[in-house]
Amino acid sequence: MSSATPVPSVRTARRLPLAGALRLGRPSDIWFKPALSVVASVAPPGLLLVALGRLDLALYTMAGSLCALYAHNRPYAARARALAGVVLGMLGGLAVALVAASLTGNAVVLVTVGAVLAAVQKALCDATRIGPPGNVVLTFVSSASLFAPQTLGQVPGHLALAAAAGAWAWLVGMAPALIRPHGPERRATAHALDAAAAYAATAAARTGPGAADDGLTGPGTDDGNTGARAAGDGNTGARAAGDGNTGARAAGYAAVQSAWQSLLSTGNRPSDGRRALDRLVVRAEVALAAPAEADPERLRAWARTLRGTGPVPAVDDPRTDASELLGPAAERATPRRTLWGVLAPLTPLAVRTALGCALAGYASLALGIGRPYWALVTAAALYQANLTLTWSRAVQRVVGNLAGVLLFAAVAPVAHLGPLALVLCCLAFSFGAEALISRNYWLGSVCVTPLALLVTEFAGPQRTGALVTERAVDTLVGALVGFVAALAVTNRRAGDRVARCLTAVDRAREAAARALADPQAAPAVLEAARRDLAAALVDLRAAADAASGEWWQRALPQERVVLAEQSGHRTLAATVRRQGLLPTSPGTGTDTDTEDVRP
């Protein structure tokens, strides 16, 4: 067993990161896809309305066009369903908003409706894991529509415009399938290989004479990574000296699990190319389980090939007794969670969103600002997985929006040259927002803010000074009130989730250990045990990271988390060797590995 000294369960001091929240990262490897898609989706309806002299209707066409921002990381079979769901969700929120706007002009009632819609959109986007831009675009459209002059008779026509633009956005999102039909799953597999290579390289650099090698290549070794880990943004909490190695391993397993999900969403009848991708994901899993026996450069070479247009690298499956890869089969056999089981843990976030958006809108009304939905949307954009991340997003939102209003003031004279100039400016900022936002949210907000301000001018030119002042005030009000609401609504379920994940890891490890102890265990049993344990460890790390960034809750069982991860990954390594996915390390054997992982 590991000789590492566990970290006691103690409360750590909370720090509010500032500079770290604004640090720029690397751009997404597909940043150009949403950037080009939103331009291709917005341009035809917008230019058509300019030609018809009805740019006042552009708010409704943009509602549908903005759906092209979603699901770019999903295989096309899954993307078709996801984009259809986004379009339907957009239309549903827009319909509620337009009907409410036509029935009442009471601003307090409209803000309340907008806050409830924002909470529903937040919960559904998180539950479905739709990905960026999440609920923010949906909330922006529905909230802005609440304050657009409307009659009941106009609602069907406006919804029809949004639906037509949404159908065009669906076609834009699906169009790349004609050129590279397997691109998304190839990228997901490449990401898993790169993540596994990064961990293998980190583990190799840390392993030397007398050094711990993560406890995965033989008996008597030590994990070397026993520090308590902080929330996802890496700015709070105590960390041990070797945490970078553990963090790379957690990122690797998360990437592998994401790759499996991507591959499984392509259908139940895999082609030869899909089977080749399956084998590469298995290689990534093997590298994570036994990093000392992996070749990082070979993994990276496979990843580079996948990102190109050539054929998928051929990798033989070393298990000669299996007619097909069992990893996908084991994944498909995992029971699906019920809708309530997915939504229940999100209740605190939904309550935060509803309360924060409502209070931000009411505060904006109290200050006499004519567009309270700006404050409402600012609050809706803040709420992340925990309070630490919510604080970081608040900093990013304020900085980006304030810089954005200055940029709007600079380009407003150009936009006022005419309807065509206005549409072209919107297209330029749409592209810039998606090109920059993957580097940091605040940088993308610098373009999102002038875009949102330009949308208000579709019905006619506005006074630039008034728009800039109102947007700046609403940003500050929404960020302040929204964050205070997040402080008021605690999320004690985060700790409960960690406890449930610990129990799941313990059970999965015990099942894997029993399979290892049985010399007659079938390959399918070992594979299912390995996949269940790997998924449980990914969930545990995600839950621990989220809970570590949550405030006002009981101390987390950091000691149990560290020990569960150490023993779980040792068991994974032993299972990999037992399956024949790699040779037994010198000086170790199956008996020793099995002994090391007994429940």
Image: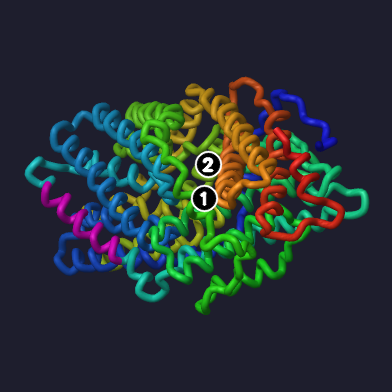
The residue closer to the viewer here, 527 or 75, is: 527
Horizontal side of residue 517 vs 419, given as left or right: right
The residue closer to the viewer here, 405 or 340, is: 340
> How many neighbours does mark 1 have within 10 angstroms: few (below 14), some (14-19), or many (20 or more)?
many
The quadrant of the rendering that contains the C terminus is top right
The quadrant of the rendering that contains the N terminus is top right
Q: What is the quadrant of residue 235 in the picture? A: top right
The residue closer to the viewer here, 598 or 260, is: 598
Q: Is residue 366 magenta?
A: no
Query: Residue 44 got which mark?
Result: none
**Which SS class for mark 1?**
helix
Which amino acid is tagged 2? Arg
Magenta stretch, residue numbers:
156-171
Disc 2: which residue: 393
Main secondary-structure element of the magenta-colored stretch: helix
- Height in image: 277 above or below 91? below
Q: CA distance from mark 2 to mark 1?
A: 8 Å
Disc 1: which residue: 441
- Height in image: 82 above or below 435? above
- Height in image: 484 above or below 234? above
Residue 264, image x, y percentages: 44, 56
Residue at left offset 46%, top offset 57%: 262
The residue closer to the viewer here, 267 or 447, is: 267
Contact, CB < 8 Å: mark 2 with mark 1? yes
Residue at left offset 51%, top offset 50%: 441
Residue 340, image x, y percentages: 37, 31
Q: Give the mark nearest the N terminus, 2 or 1.
A: 2
Horizontal side of residue 355 vs 522, given as left or right: left
